[in-house]
Image: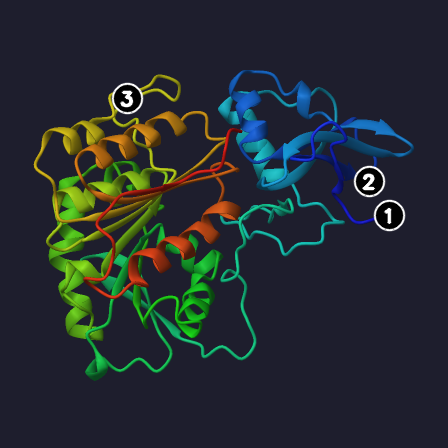
C-alpha cells in the first residue's frame, strides 16, 4: 500500500489538512486509532467512538481534520470483541498493546516500560526539529552513569570535555531516564553544540520517573534543595561545571515543568534559567479537570521578583494545561520577568517536547551572558 498517513489539503481551508490514517490489521473486530492528546480528550470524556477506524476495501481508515502545523505521535490498537473502555485500567491496557503504523515514513518515537514505539505525524507547517536526530560527522560526546545522594544521574559530557577547560554551562534535565536511555538526548546536545546553538554544556540527567516522582516533582523544597546543594556542587567538582546561575538551566515536562519553574523561584541563586514544557501549573489541585489552585503562579505574583529567566511552552491541544500556562505567562510578564513563551500545535507529547527542549536550551544558553534582552517576549500561533 501507499505510505501512511495520507495527507490532503482541506479544499475549504488551506490552513488545514485532511489526514487519513490507514491500518491493514487482520483478524480483528475493530481498530482504535490513538492520536496523542486528540484521542485522550475524548477518552477523558468517556467516548472513543470518534477514534474507531472504519473498515472498507479490506483496510481500516479514519480521517482527522488538523491544522497544517500539527505534530503528534500516534499508534493503532486492533481489538477483538467490544470497543475498549475508557477507565484508567482500560486505557493502560490499550497503551500496553498499541503499535506503530507499519507503513509510516518518519522515524519513530521510542517508548519505555516494554511498550511499543509510536509513529510520528508532522504536518508540513509543524515547527522544524533540526537537532533531534543523530547526524553523521558531528563530534560525539559521552554519557556516564553516576549516583549522587542516592539518586541515579546520567551525565552527558560534550565532545572534547576537559574539566580544566571549564567552567562549563550546565543543564539539569528532569526525567533523565526518558531523555537519556530512551530518547538519546545526547544526540540533540551534540548537534546543538556542533552548530554553535549552545556552548559545550554538561547535562545532568536526573532520574525521576520512579515511585517517588509525585513527591519529588510537586514543588518539593527538599528535592530542589538537593539539586542545588548536592548535585550542582558535585558536578562542579567532578566535571568543571559553572556555579553561575545565569549559565545554569533546569528543564522539565509536565510535573517536571512545574518543578523547573519552582526551582527558579526557590533557588534562583543556583537556577537562573528554567525551561518548562507543558508545566502542570494547576498544582496542587487533586483532580484532572478543575482549574486548580495554581499555587506556584500565586507565589510568583505575590513574592519579590527573582533573578531568573523562564522559557515556557505548551500545546494548543492540552486542554487541561493551556489556560494555566497562559496565566503564568501573564503573571511573569506583569512582574517584569524575562519570559519566552511559545505555543505549539500538539499535545502532551515527547514528539513535540524533544524539539521544544532543543529550542529552549538554545534560547537560554545560546546568548552570551549579559547580552540577552530584559523584555518579555511571546510567540504563539493564531488560534487552534
Lower position in the chain sequence, tag 3 or tag 1: 1
Is disc 3 in contact with disc 2, using a CB cutoff of under 8 Å?
no
x and y percentages locating residue 177 in the rendered image: 39, 55
Per the model, the C-alpha gap separating discs 3 and 2 is: 43 Å
x and y percentages locating residue 158 in the rendered image: 35, 74
Q: Which mark is residue 381?
A: none
Is disc 3 in contact with disc 1, using a CB cutoff of under 8 Å?
no
At a point 33% along the width and 33% down the height, the residue shown is 280
Q: Nearer the viewer, residue 255 or 369?
A: 369
For this view, does 364 lie left or right of residue 132? left
Per the model, the C-alpha gap separating discs 3 and 1 is: 48 Å
Q: Which residue is mark 3?
A: 285
Near mark 1 (Cα within 10 A), the count class, few <14, some 14-19 or many ≥20, is few
Q: Secondary structure at mark 3?
A: loop
x and y percentages locating residue 320 in the rendered image: 41, 25
Vertically, is 166 above or below 242?
A: below
Q: Which residue is mark 1?
A: 1
x and y percentages locating residue 189 in the rendered image: 41, 66
Lower position in the chain sequence, tag 1 or tag 2: 1
Q: Secondary structure at mark 2?
A: loop
Vertically, is 313 above or below 236?
A: above
Q: Which residue is mark 2?
A: 24
Amino acid at each position: 500500500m501507499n505510505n501512511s498517513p495520507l495527507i490532503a489539503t482541506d479544499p475549504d481551508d488551506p490552513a488545514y489538512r485532511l489526514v487519513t490514517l490507514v491500518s491493514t490489521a487482520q483478524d480483528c473486530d475493530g481498530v482504535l486509532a490513538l492520536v496523542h492528546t486528540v484521542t485522550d480528550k475524548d477518552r477523558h470524556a468517556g467516548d472513543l467512538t470518534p477514534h474507531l477506524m472504519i473498515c472498507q476495501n479490506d483496510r481500516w481508515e479514519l480521517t482527522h481534520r488538523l491544522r497544517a502545523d500539527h505534530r503528534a505521535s500516534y499508534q493503532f490498537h486492533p481489538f477483538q470483541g467490544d470497543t475498549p473502555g475508557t477507565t484508567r485500567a482500560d486505557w493502560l491496557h490499550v497503551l500496553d498493546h498499541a503499535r506503530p503504523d507499519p507503513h509510516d515514513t518518519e522515524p519513530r518515537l521510542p517508548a519505555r516500560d516494554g511498550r511499543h514505539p509510536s509513529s510520528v505525524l508532522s504536518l508540513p507547517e509543524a515547527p522544524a526539529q533540526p537537532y533531534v536526530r543523530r547526524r553523521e560527522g558531528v563530534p560525539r560526546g559521552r554519557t556516564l552513569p553516576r549516583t549522587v545522594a542516592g539518586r541515579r544521574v546520567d551525565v552527558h559530557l560534550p565532545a572534547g570535555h576537559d574539566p580544566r577547560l571549564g567552567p562549563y554551562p550546565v543543564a539539569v534535565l528532569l526525567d533523565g531516564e526518558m531523555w537519556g536511555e530512551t530518547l538519546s538526548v545526547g544526540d540533540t546536545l551534540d548537534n546543538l553544540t556542533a552548530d554553535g546553538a549552545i556552548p559545550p554544556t554538561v547535562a545532568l540527567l536526573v532520574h525521576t520517573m520512579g515511585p517517588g516522582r509525585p513527591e519529588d516533582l510537586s514543588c518539593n523544597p527538599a528535592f530542589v534543595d538537593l539539586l542545588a546543594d548536592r548535585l550542582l556542587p558535585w558536578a562542579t567538582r567532578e566535571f568543571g561545571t559553572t556555579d553561575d546561575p545565569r549559565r545554569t538551566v533546569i528543564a522539565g515536562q509536565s510535573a517536571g515543568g512545574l518543578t523547573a519553574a519552582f526551582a527558579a523561584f526557590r533557588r534562583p541563586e543556583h537556577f537562573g534559567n528554567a525551561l518548562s514544557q507543558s508545566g502542570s501549573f494547576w498544582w496542587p489541585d487533586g483532580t484532572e479537570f478543575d482549574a486548580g489552585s495554581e499555587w506556584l503562579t500565586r507565589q510568583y505574583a505575590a513574592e519579590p521578583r527573582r533573578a531568573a529567566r523562564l522559557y515556557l511552552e505548551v500545546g494548543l491541544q492540552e486542554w487541561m494545561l493551556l489556560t494555566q500556562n497562559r496565566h503564568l505567562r501573564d503573571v511573569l510578564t506583569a512582574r517584569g520577568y524575562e519570559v519566552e513563551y511559545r505555543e505549539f500545535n500538539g499535545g502532551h507529547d515527547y514528539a513535540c517536547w524533544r524539539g521544544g527542549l532543543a529550542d529552549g536550551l538554545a534560547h537560554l544558553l545560546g546568548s552570551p551572558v549579559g547580552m540577552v534582552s530584559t523584555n518579555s517576549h511571546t510567540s504563539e500561533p493564531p488560534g487552534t
